[in-house]
Amino acid sequence: MSNNKEQDFNSLLNQGWQKHESEPNAVFDSMASMLGSLEPEQTESAMTLLLHTAIGHLYAPDKLLHLLSSLPPNRANLPSSLRAQVLADYFQTKKLSDMSHLATDDQHRVFAQIANEYAALKKTAQASQWLTMATEGVSTSSVSKPLARALAITGNNLACQFEGLEERSIEQDQQMIKAAQLALQFWRVAGGWMQEERAEYRLAMSFIKAGRYEEARTHAQRCEAICIENNADDFERYFASDLLMLVHFHLAQSHKLKVGEDLREYCETSSLD
């Protein structure tokens, strides 16, 4: 495939990810229309977007199943299509079909994708259960990059969903932190310094939400350190600095609560002017 066609596909894929929440039907139909002409690697990327849009945003597994049934054998038998078939079947019937035709790695990716779609549907308990299943027996020292990436993305997305809850139980705090920790562990395998830095940010935010500010500071400092080590741009540095400010604000407030009432009146938050 020519560089121009590759660039055109990447541009359409990026646009799809940008618009899949606001225009899910249009994105699904656009990706579906080009599926038959894509290279295997491109099919993998397109199928990921199609699956997430159909399940996580349209909740229309039947639409995905209809698309998969129309694919020619050379497309339907690609690993990405086989995984999508299992996922669509699961969300249609709530039963996991036989996966003996899938490699072990692909089976773990199915679990991770189910977890990711439950996270998108704000069903955090189910997402946590499937993410745990996805990581069983998986080692960061030997995991493939595609599986590591799937686990990292799912961990990040699930942690974000937990952080957005107005109230969380102790168990939910633990699940939130575990998801963020998994995201960091697997981005260290599948990503570069920027993915690792952003995963440090996510884990620090999860610790803040759980009221564990000392642990949040450790990861906020690591987030900033990675930015410095890699000459990050101002966008990345902004969030690293803002994160540290937030951590220290909460630390200051936690110390204030331990000060006697006779001194607490002097503990006023500093002006940022």
Image (cartoon, rainbow, N blue to C red):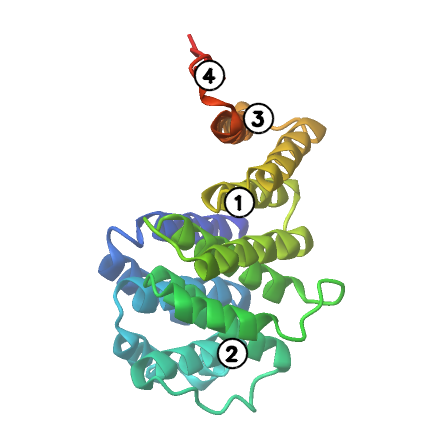
Q: Residues within 10 Å of mark 2 (few under 14, many from 20)?
A: some
Residue 34: x %, y % from top left: 36, 65
Report the mark closest to the observer, 3 or 1.
1
Q: In front: 162, or 43?
A: 162
Q: Is residue 204 left or right of residue 58?
A: right
> Which mark is on residue 262?
4
Which mark is first along the chain, 1 or 3? 1
C-alpha distance separating marks 1 and 4: 31 Å
Residue 220: x %, y % from top left: 59, 35
The residue that disc 1 covers is 207
C-alpha distance separating marks 3 and 1: 25 Å
Report the mark closest to the observer, 2 or 3.
3
Residue 219: x %, y % from top left: 62, 39
Residue 116: x %, y % from top left: 44, 64
Q: Residues within 10 Å of mark 4 (few under 14, many from 20)?
A: few
Residue type beneath disc 3 = Asp
Q: In front: 78, or 83?
A: 83
Tag 3 secondary structure: loop
Residue type beneath disc 1 = Phe
Report the mark closest to the observer, 4 or 3.
4
Which mark is first along the chain, 1 or 2? 2
**For residue 235, above or below residue 190:** above
Report the mark closest to the observer, 1 or 4.
4
Residue type beneath disc 4 = Asp
Which mark is first along the chain, 2 or 4? 2
C-alpha distance separating marks 2 and 1: 40 Å
State yes or no: discs 2 and 3 in contact (Cβ < 8 Å).
no
Residue at image point 31% right, 68% down: 54
Farthest residue, direction right: 141
> Which mark is on residue 233?
3
Residue 27 visible to the viewer: yes
Q: How many marks?
A: 4
